[in-house]
Amino acid sequence: MPGKILIVEDEEKLARFVELELLHEGYEVEKAFDGRDGLEKMERGDCDLVLLDIMLPGLNGLEVLRRARRSVDTPVIMLTARDTVMDKVTGLDMGAEDYMTKPFEIEELLARIRVALRRSKKSAPETKILSAGALTMDVDRHTVAYDGQSVELTHREFALLETLLENKGIVLSRDTLMERVWGYDYMGETNIVDVYVRYLRAKIDAVFDVKLVQTVRGVGYVIR
Ligand code: CA
């Protein structure tokens, strides 16, 4: 999943062109055609990267960046038609990740987007912790513990438990679990999900005397 990119650009043709290229690369795209709308969308904080034009109606790009930086640290690549040192320096000083001077080669923009996204992922050490009751899963460290006691799981058991924990409270059918854990092209036995739920129960429920993974008859499994 490459990520979501916000394009703040009043030249709608250019915005559309960049959007199509990004969609083609698998990114999700949102657009804003003026500074205020751009700021509002940026402040929602759900974008992974922002392409921000400097010359914008409403608020200019530098002002959008200055205000947005009070609440979000989404990486920003400034787009500028004016190849002036001043704009670049000001933009970078205000926390832009990079800048592109228009007209630009789309390939170069795509490359810079990839670099900026990689850099921002590295600088934000993710600690994705999932939990249910006394059970905790550290997704990045690939560890599971019940009440502080570590639980050793195989790769598939871990993936199955992760899927159930990510959907805590939601009953997942065997088909859904099979698709998410084993993949669409899995050709093995259809009762594989039941087999792995048994493994999980043997390693967690039986050892710690809990009822973690619940069966919903005729539907599937759920962790509450
Ligand atoms: Ca413009």
Image (cartoon, helix red, strand yellow):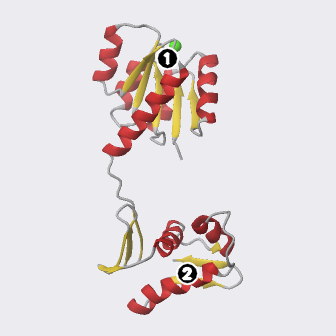
The disc placed on residue 196 is 2
The image quadrant of residue 133 is bottom left
Disc 2 or 1, which lies upstream in sequence? 1
From the viewer's perspective, tell me whether residue 62 is left or right of residue 156.
Answer: left
From mark 2 to mark 1, how far is it between C-alphas? 57 Å
Q: Is mark 1 on a helix, strand or loop?
A: loop
Frontmost of labels 2 and 1 is 2
Tell me the residue that label 1 is attached to: 58
Q: Position of residue 95 (x, y in %)?
A: 31, 28
Residue drawn 50% across the image and 34% down it: 41
For the residues labelled 2 and 1, say whether their Cβ atoms are less than 8 Å apart.
no
Q: Nearer the viewer, residue 188 or 19?
A: 188
Residue 164's x, y, as percent? 53, 71
Q: Can residue 60 be seen in this view?
A: no
Question: Can you tell me whether the CB of the residue at mark 1 lies under 8 Å from the nearest atom of ligand 1?
Answer: no
Mark 2: C-beta under 8 Å from nearest atom of ligand 1: no
| Residue 32 makes an appearance in the image | yes
Residue 202's x, y, as percent? 47, 89
Which type of secondary structure does the marked residue at label 2 adopt?
A: helix
Answer with left or right where residue 103 lies relative to residue 142: right
Q: Residue at x 46, y 23 (%)?
A: 52
Graded by Cα atoms within 10 Å as few (under 14), some (14 to 19) or many (20 or more), the crowding at tag 1 reads: some
User: In percent of the image, x 41 and y 29: which residue is there?
Assistant: 76
Residue kind at label 2, given as amino acid type: Tyr
Q: Quadrant of residue 134?
A: bottom left
Image mark for residue 24? none
Mark 2 surroundings within 10 Å by alpha-carbon count, few (fewer than 14), some (14 through 19), many (20 or more): some
Q: In this view, does 154 lie above or below 79?
A: below
Q: Residue at x 53, y 24 (%)?
A: 107
Residue at the outermost right position: 218
The number of callouts visible is 2
